[in-house]
Image: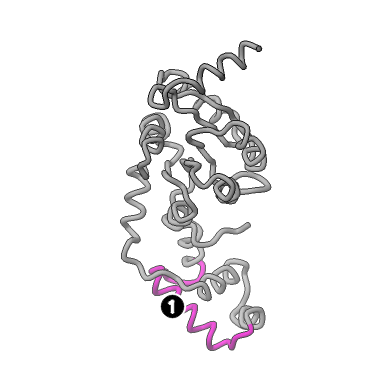
Amino acid sequence: MSLLQRAYTRLTLMPEQSRPIRVLVVDDHPLLRQGIAALIAAESDVTLAGACSSAREAIQQFPQLRPDVTLMDLQMPEMSGLDAMIAIRRQFPDARFVILTTYTGDAHVVRAMKAGAAAYLAKDAVPEELIGTIRSVHAGRKTVSPQVAVTLAAHATDDPLTPAEIDTLRLIAAGNTNKLIGDQLHITEDTVKARVKNILSKLGAHDRTHAVTIALKRGIIDLS
């Protein structure tokens, strides 16, 4: 038996409460992965289970690594962290995820939490809040960073856009006129105008361009 195998065997035989929390880091930026690894290395009750540079790699590695907590970047090339989390939780429903991202719009947060994330943390809050968040999630609690909580609170009473209004807004963002939007959605131009009026009112926007800017910032739509 190799040294690594013996170490793993000792780890799996330890009482669960005395085992370090095994963390998987998934992010396409190597400097962030290294920085998180350094933060984890300084803690006696947390250990690095592995690091992945893409969402697809995380899906492939998760069954072998079986981390207690996964730190998942939201936006990565080819496949999003959200889609990876959904895929992993389909196979491992008890898997616990912390979303680490620069995207702090309320719609981003709500979408991630509904998909099963246990915590949502802005990357600029990582040095101060990461280890505490990992411990909290491992203990079965859900949490968002104060910065994210403020964003959620600011829109808690907003009248949400309907799916039809979001479809219309995506076509506005793509530069379509009301006539072209109507043709693509198979609705009249008057219906498009009514939807645009509702969108502006719900988002508190001055015009169509302002509405798109707000929706992108909040994560209601994206340009991908």
Q: Which quarter of the figure is the C terminus placed in?
A: bottom right
Residue at 57% across / 68% down in the picture?
170
Q: Does the magenta stretch include residue 189?
A: yes
Residue at 66% across / 12% down in the picture?
1
Q: Is residue 202 above or below residue 155?
A: below
Most foreground residue, 176 or 29: 29
- Residue 40: x and y, percent? 46, 23
Most foreground residue, 68 or 39: 68
User: Which residue is tagged 1?
Assistant: 198
Q: In this view, does 148 lie above or below 46?
A: below
Q: Is residue 119 above or below residue 167?
A: above
**Horizontal placement of 158 versus 10: left or right?**
left
- Residue 47: x and y, percent? 48, 23
Please identify the dominant SS of the magenta region. helix
Q: Does the magenta stretch include residue 135?
A: no
Residue at 45% across / 79% down in the picture?
197
Q: In this view, does 206 lie above or below 2?
A: below
Quarter of image, res 59 = top right
- Residue 181: x and y, percent? 62, 78
Q: What stretch is highlighted in magenta?
A: 186-209
Quarter of image, res 144 = top left
Q: Is residue 63 visible?
A: yes
Most foreground residue, 107 or 170: 107
- Residue 219: x and y, percent? 49, 57
**Horizontal placement of 199 versus 79: left or right?**
left
Residue at 64% across / 35% down in the picture?
61
Q: Is residue 101 visible?
A: no
